[in-house]
Every structure is written in structure tokens, then in C-alpha cells.
Image: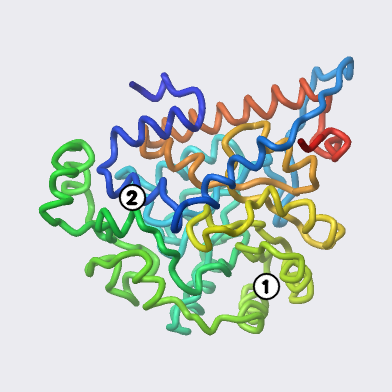
Amino acid sequence: MHVRDCHNVEDFRALAKRRLPGPVFDYIDGGADDEVTLRRSAAAYDDCDLVPGVLAGVADIDMSVEVLGKRIAMPVMLSPTAMQRLFHWEGERAVGRAVEKFGTYFGISTIGTVSIEEIGRTVSTPKLFQLYVHRDAGLNRALVQRCKEAGFDAIALTVDTIVGGNRERDLRSGFTTPPRWTPRSLLSFAAHPGWTLNYLRREPFALANIKDYVTHGSSVAMGVADYINRMFDPAMDWKTAEAIRADWGGPFALKGIMSVADAKRAIDIGATAIYVSNHGGRQLDGSRAPFDQLAEIVDAVGGRIEVICDGGIRRGSHVLKALSVGATACSGGRLYLYALAAGGQAGVECALAKLRAEIDRGMRLMGVTRLDQLNRSNLRWR
């Protein structure tokens, strides 16, 4: 199987599973506890149907949208995700080169594997930094300052990870960052020599943005949940978020909002946008899917803040449904991480091209030429 044989996210997932050691694939693929919320995040879209229009004259399509101060060429942003060089040796570099060809937001993580400065130099399209608040206040301030100096366009503060989710796949596999070489994991690494040789022969793995402050995760192996519990600040609150927004001074989002009360509070502290997100089903299992919660939040905020639907996006039709409900844009991580693991930059480009084509085709079949023509009259719930 090759990237050219992949026609959708599930195809890329299947190829990624073949190319990655088991512990690394399960880190991308897994969720918390029984993975009920993980499954529901994608399945939620199946309970809503699109009602197409015809004879609308759809020769010219504009799928651009303005979000976080930038007009992007398609209504899907690439969510910031951690440790991308574990999935392909080029990691964020491959994703950054791919995303430039599609003119949308590229998000990188505090616990990413390519530095803020390098992404700032090499990626010309809009850039977002996902801030995880650490116990080290000096580290938090330094990250914001580095984003300013590197020309990032927006910061998203992740607010749903004050403790690590119970990701049982990682516990069973013994997944750590960097990978710990154990008798059990060696079998999986040996069965994937391409990945293993790239990992061993390329530049040493490190969490590029924090390695000068924190050894764990770069030179000292640690499980992801253990890292969160040890390093992230559990005292983070609304005052913390407001102070970071003021320090940053630019477009600012809260990532991980799932309640109306919190959405309204985000408006009060001056946030530009909220990500309606359950962290990919990796934190609180049994919580709502973003799409299930979207209408309630959109209605409550009444256009006073941008709303990004983050989670479960697998098809262009999912994007059209979320925008019809009232989302400003959509965002996803697995939709490009599987492709990165499957084929590096070429994989990400292929996945984004497929998704863009689905959105274009879906708009034409819906009888709309601009995204602002979508609304809830286009939808029916089962």
C-alpha cells in the first residue's frame, strides 16, 4: 500500500498502522478510558444529514474564511499536535511545507519537536502556537516572547489538560517520550526497521521548545500522562488565561471549551476564539463530542467570539455540517497525523488535497458558492 492508494482518512490510518511501531501508532490513535468519547467525536456527524440545493449556479467556489485575524484558503486548520518527529522523521518540517501549499493555519505544540524559531523562519502561512502552562512561570513567559519574536499570528491556550487523561493504550504499550527501549518495545521497533533506522540515524529526538528548561521528555524518558501531571500547572485558572492573553497581545484562543458557561467566560477575558474540543477524546472519557455541543455554544455566544469546531473531522461533509451549525472554522489533528506517518510531506499534501476536494465538491452539491451561505436550514437531525 502506498500514499497514492489512500483516498480518505481511514486509508491513511491503515497505512500509518503498518509503518509505525505499535506504541507510537497507539499514541496517535488512542483515547482515554474506554474510548467512548473518542469514537463519539467522529460518529456525532453521522446523526446529522445535509439537505442539498440545486440549480444554484456553482461555477465559482470560494471556501476561504477569516479566523484569528487571518483569511485562510480553506476552512480547516491543522490542530497543534505534540511530538511529530516520532511519527515521521521530518515531523513539523514536513507538515509546515505541506500546509504552505494550502494556505491555512499550522499549529505547533509547546511539546513539539521543531522549534518556534525554525517554524517562524520557514513557514509563511498563518502560524499558531499551542501553549501548555507549565509550573515554571519563566518557561511560560519565555514561550510567549519567543512567539512574538518569531512572528507567530496567534496563541491557543490549552485548558483541558490540568491532569493527564487515563490513556490505557499507552499504559499497556509502555509508550514514553523519548521511546524507552524495553524487551517488549524492541520487538515492535524491530518489526518496523524503516521507522527505527530513521529514528536512530537522524538528529536526536527532543522537545525542541522546552528542552533547555525541562529534561523529561527529551533526554529523560517519561510517559505522557506522567509528564502532564508532573510538569503542567494544576493551579491554572481564568486569571492565568487573562494574564497570558494580555501578555501576548494578539489573536488569542482557548482550546478545550465544552460548556456554555466557559464560552461566555472566554468572551469576558477578551479571547478572540474558542476551540470547542475534547482533546481528541484523550482526557475526560464520557464527555460530549464537539459537534454535539456546537449548536448550544454557538447560540450562546451569538457571534461575539469565533468558534472553531475541533475534533472528529474525517470528511469534507463533516466540515460543511459544522459550518452550517455556525462554526467559524474547523480543526483536526489525526486527519493529518495519520497521513504524516503514512508518507511524510507527500502524505499530508495528499490528505489535505483530498479534504479540500471533498469540501469543494460538497459545496457545489449543496448549491452554495461561499461558506457564509451555509446555515441550519441545510441540516436535519435524525
Q: In the displayed structure, would residue 178 be above or below residue 20?
A: below
Q: Which residue is mark 2?
A: 85
Q: Quadrant of residue 382?
A: top right
Task: Assign the N terminus to one quadrant of the image.
Answer: top left
Q: Is residue 138 visible?
A: yes
Image check: 234 left or right of 357? left
Question: Disc 1 or disc 2, which is closer to the eye?
Answer: 2
Evaluate whether residue 73 shows in this view.
Answer: no
Q: Secondary structure at mark 1?
A: loop
Residue situated in front as seen by the camera: 233 or 42: 42
Q: Is residue 46 left or right of residue 305?
A: left
Q: Secondary structure at mark 2?
A: helix
Label at residue 249: 1
Compared with 160, 52 (above or below) is above
Indicate the amino acid at tag 1: Gly
Quadrant of residue 177 in the image? bottom left
Q: Which mark is residue 189?
A: none
Q: Marks 1 and 2, how far apart in space?
A: 30 Å
